[in-house]
Image (tube, grey):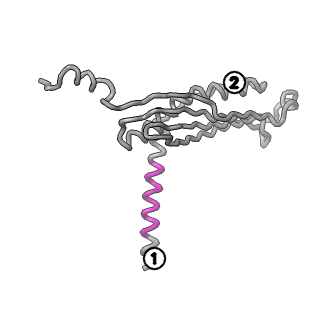
Amino acid sequence: MSETSPANGAATDAQPAGQTFSLDKLYVKDVSFEAPGAPQVFAAELPGQPQLQMNLAQSVQRLGDVAYEVQLDITVTCTVDDKTLYLAEVKQAGLFTLAGFDPQTLDAVLGTLCPASLYPYARQTIGDLIQAGGFPPFLMQPLNFEGLYAENLRQRAAQQAGGALGSGTETAGNA
C-alpha cells in the first residue's frame, strides 16, 4: 500500500513536480531562396536526374535562467550535374522555457523535443519556398530527432575518448 496522498500520486503520474517545458515564441529568423538558372532551367530539358541534398544544423542559446532560444537551420539544394537548380534555406527559431530538469535531461530536451517542435514549421516554409520558386512540390520526410541526438552523443563520446587517448599518447611521447 502506498503512503503517498492522492494529490502527490496525481502529480507523479504526470510531469515531475517543478518541471516546465513550453514553447513561448515561434519565428523565422532568416529565409532565402535562389534559383540561379531561372528562367532557362524551366524551358530546357534537364540533362540528368535532379539530386537533392539537405543539411540540418541546430544551435542553442541560453537567454536566462530558464529561457532558451533554439534555432533549426535547414538548407535544401537541388542540382543536376554540377548546376544548381535551386537553394532554399530556413532558420526557424523558438523561445523555450525549460525549468526543473537535471543537466542530462535538459541537454536531451534541447536536442530532441525543441527541434522536433520547430521542424514542422521549417519543413512547411521550405516546401512553400520551393513551390513558389516554380518547382514541383517537395515534401521533406519527418525526422527522428531522438536518433539524431543519440548519434550526436556517440560522436561526442568518441571525440572525448579520442582526445583522451591522443593527449595520453602525446604525454607518453614527451616523457
Residue 147 horizontal/vertical position (percent): 47, 37
Q: Quadrant of the C terminus?
A: bottom left
Residue 100 horizontal/vertical position (percent): 36, 36
Q: Residues within 10 Å of mark 1 (few under 14, many from 20)?
A: few
* Residue 72 on the magenta segment: no
* Residue 166 on the magenta segment: yes
Callout 2: SS: helix
The amino acid pointed to by label 2 is Asp
Residue 95 horizontal/vertical position (percent): 52, 33
**Farthest residue, direction left:** 1
Residue at point 47%, 37% (across, down): 67
Callout 1: SS: helix
Q: Quadrant of residue 84?
A: top right
Q: Which residue is mark 2?
A: 128
Q: Which residue is mark 1?
A: 173
Q: Quadrant of the N terminus?
A: top left
Q: Is residue 49 visible?
A: no
The amino acid pointed to by label 1 is Gly
Residue 148 horizontal/vertical position (percent): 50, 39
Dominant secondary structure of the residues highlighted in magenta in the image: helix
**Farthest residue, direction front:** 64
Q: Is residue 2 left or right of residue 114?
A: left
Q: Residues within 10 Å of mark 2 (few under 14, many from 20)?
A: some
| The magenta segment | 154-168
